[in-house]
Image (tube, rainbow, N blue to C red):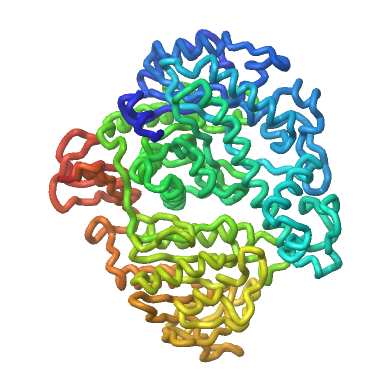
């Protein structure tokens, strides 16, 4: 099953969002019908947070209100993405099953009163979730309005309760086989942690000081598997009654509680939610990062943006406004990178509840507002892009993304707390985005030979298989940049002996790191090429590599900081510090030039995104998204799908989708 089935049923790319008609009355429903037609909405997500209404008491379902809204939407030409409401159990469930309420790592049992207040390992919760998923599928599985099943919402809630402890022990038995193997993997000879019975093994709850690193890493792996298993249970219950594709909306911010590569393989169509964490050009770069990551998780298949905000950006504890035109530009950024449409949370802004101030397609001000006018313009634009359905995006560069490496950098007791995995990924992607290059994300153990350049920004943990994969990539002609603090531990969190990184990767890089030397918060270092670094430095020895820049002060004076090694028919580069942003951009530009990777548009100016989608029959469409305050001329007039005319330039803050021969 693919997203082609969704676009085939819709007749165009998807446009719409979460719809919560249960919050409103008949007068508003009638207005919704009119406004959805005006905005070209063709897909609405129903029922995400409706468990208490769908099952007002255990085993008694009330679908009459949902029947009416599905029929109303269908009559209005709007297809349905029907959700299972399991992200928010109703009050009666929590009262009946207090053991299914989540427990924090410090032992606090949470109470009902918010979303995601459940323990995913509690048998009562899992059984109730399967039952309501099955009941919904049995009733609506072949409904003509149904285009997509939406299981749960933004999986990722963790728990440390006794149900979790029992499930964790079962998982550990299956993974390690014996207590002896577990003790070896976790290094329990240290700090008198040796286990002599399985009952002694617990989740990594709050404790006196540092938690065991192997225990913490395995807990993340366990929990990822539990999340995926819970999804699959609902998915399989749905498939017994329905042949429509099944998905869940992946949440892809800076936290990481699931192996996204493994999760994506279980989805009929990969969908995700994106909310920028900074305004203006940073928001555009964040949208591109999110879209490239989701497309990569989909492994080249088309995917779908399930949620985005209309007019707000979340900057820490502040909600900032988007600038005029950004609703369309952010939407097109996702479609350019492979999304088969764009949905929002939510259709109509709530007047009560915890998300009263979350942005929406119809704001509190109503349809006579800038926001709704821009939403309507965006819907009209998306409706003109139907011919793109099923086309794909290819990229010449990959950034390595490994959930194990992310989790490894979150354990206690590391040499520096400033090694931020997500920030490293964002920074590398941003340098490539600024250079006008389309980017894939890849796992170190993936086949990488199709990429001209691969960058590994934060592989603190690297498996033996991953190290061998990277060695082979370089030997076969690839160019690889590995950055500081990489390959320090194996997949059990055991330190690599004999120097860092892992031996096969050391061979490809021609270096051996002997000593790590984290920098003070206010400390800066200068390299011999004039660039500057912060956060981290290393004492390394060249074993075949050429030194391109050295340190200029302290005990590292004259020691290699940036190296290049010719290995096989490729090159392995190593950077042993965190360069300032401008210097890092210069290094990335140097690597792009050396590997022959160029922007998609000749002389592409900064602040202009250019991405191309390709169809199997050779057709291609080039997206130009102009974040600048001045117009961008085109080399020659080209047909623009957004206007239906020949485009000579892209206006300030404007966009174009060019049909290329």
**Residue 404, image quadrant:** bottom right
Query: Where in the figure is residue 289, as x and y percent of width and height?
Result: 44, 51
> Is residue 294 in view from this perspective?
yes
Q: Above or below — where is 457 with respect to 647?
A: below
Q: Nearer the viewer, residue 403 or 431?
A: 403
State the quadrant of the N terminus. Answer: top left
Query: Where in the figure is residue 66, as x and y percent of width and height?
Result: 55, 13
Q: Is residue 79 left or right of residue 254?
A: left
**Residue 32, image quadrant:** top left
Query: Where in the figure is residue 292, as x and y percent of width and height?
Result: 41, 50
Q: Above or below — where is 517 with respect to 602?
A: below
Q: Nearer the viewer, residue 37 or 490?
A: 490
State the quadrant of the C terminus. Answer: top left
Q: Is residue 13 left or right of residue 551?
A: left
Q: Residue at x 39, y 72 (%)?
A: 474
Query: Where in the figure is residue 81, as x and y percent of width and height?
Result: 47, 25
Q: Residue at x 73, y 62 (%)?
A: 181
Q: Residue at x 82, y 52 (%)?
A: 198
Q: Above or below — where is 578 with respect to 394?
A: below
């Amino acid at each position: 099953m693919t997203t082609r089935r969704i676009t085939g049923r819709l007749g165009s790319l998807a446009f719409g969002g979460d719809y919560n008609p249960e919050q409103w009355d008949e007068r508003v429903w009638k207005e919704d019908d009119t406004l959805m037609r005006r905005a070209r909405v063709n897909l609405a997500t129903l029922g995400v947070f409706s468990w208490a209404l769908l099952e007002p008491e255990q085993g008694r379902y009330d679908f009459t209100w949902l029947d009416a809204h599905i029929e109303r939407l269908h009559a209005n030409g709007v297809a349905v993405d029907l959700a299972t409401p399991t992200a928010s159990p109703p009050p009666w469930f929590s009262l009946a099953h207090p053991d299914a309420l989540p427990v924090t790592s410090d032992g606090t049992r949470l109470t009902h009163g918010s979303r995601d207040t459940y323990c995913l390992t509690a048998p009562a919760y899992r059984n109730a979730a399967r039952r309501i998923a099955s009941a919904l599928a049995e009733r609506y599985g072949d409904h003509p309005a149904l285009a997509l099943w939406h299981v749960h919402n933004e999986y990722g809630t963790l728990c440390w309760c006794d149900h979790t402890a029992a499930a964790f022990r079962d998982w550990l038995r299956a993974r390690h086989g014996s207590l002896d193997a577990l003790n070896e993997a976790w290094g329990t000879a240290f700090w008198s942690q040796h286990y002599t019975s399985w009952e002694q093994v617990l989740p990594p709850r709050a404790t006196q000081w540092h938690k065991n690193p192997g225990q913490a890493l395995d807990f993340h792996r366990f929990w990822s598997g539990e999340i995926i298993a819970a999804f699959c249970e609902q998915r399989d219950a749905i498939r017994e009654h329905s042949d429509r594709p099944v998905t869940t909306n992946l949440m892809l911010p800076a936290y990481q509680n699931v192996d996204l590569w493994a999760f994506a393989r279980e989805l009929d169509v990969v969908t995700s939610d994106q909310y920028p964490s900074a305004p203006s050009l940073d928001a555009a770069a964040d949208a591109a990062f999110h879209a490239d990551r989701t497309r990569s998780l989909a492994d080249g298949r088309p995917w779908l943006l399930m949620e985005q905000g209309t007019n707000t950006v979340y900057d820490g504890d502040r909600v900032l406004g988007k600038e005029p035109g950004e609703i369309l530009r952010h939407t097109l950024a996702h479609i350019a990178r492979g999304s088969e449409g764009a949905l929002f949370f939510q259709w109509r802004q709530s007047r009560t509840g915890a998300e009263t101030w979350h942005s929406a397609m119809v704001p509190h001000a109503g349809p006579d507002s800038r926001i709704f006018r821009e939403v309507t313009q965006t819907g009209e634009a998306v409706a003109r892009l139907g011919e793109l359905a099923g086309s794909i995006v290819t990229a010449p560069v990959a950034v390595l993304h490994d959930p194990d490496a992310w989790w490894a950098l979150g354990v206690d007791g590391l040499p520096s707390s400033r090694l931020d995995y997500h920030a490293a990924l964002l920074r590398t992607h941003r340098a490539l985005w600024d250079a006008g290059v389309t980017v894939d994300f890849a796992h170190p153990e993936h086949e990488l030979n199709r990429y001209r350049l691969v960058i590994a920004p934060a592989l603190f943990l690297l498996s033996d298989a991953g190290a061998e994969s990277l060695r082979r990539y370089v030997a076969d002609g690839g160019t690889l940049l590995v950055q500081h603090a990489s390959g320090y531990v194996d997949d059990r969190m055991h330190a690599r002996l004999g120097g860092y990184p892992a031996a096969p990767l050391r061979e490809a890089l021609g270096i051996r790191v002997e000593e790590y030397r984290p920098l003070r918060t206010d400390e800066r270092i200068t390299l011999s090429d004039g660039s500057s670094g912060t956060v981290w430095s290393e004492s390394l020895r060249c074993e075949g590599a050429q030194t391109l820049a050295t340190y200029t002060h302290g005990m590292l004076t004259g020691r290699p900081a940036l190296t290049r090694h010719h290995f096989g028919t490729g090159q392995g580069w190593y950077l042993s510090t965190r360069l300032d942003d401008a210097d890092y951009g210069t290094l990335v530009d140097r690597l792009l030039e050396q590997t022959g990777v160029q922007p998609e548009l000749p002389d592409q100016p900064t602040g202009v995104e250019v991405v191309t989608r390709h169809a199997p029959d050779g057709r291609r469409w080039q997206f130009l998204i102009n974040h600048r305050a001045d117009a961008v001329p085109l080399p020659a007039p080209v047909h623009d799908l957004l206007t239906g005319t020949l485009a000579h330039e892209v206006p300030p803050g404007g966009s174009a989708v060019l049909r290329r021969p």
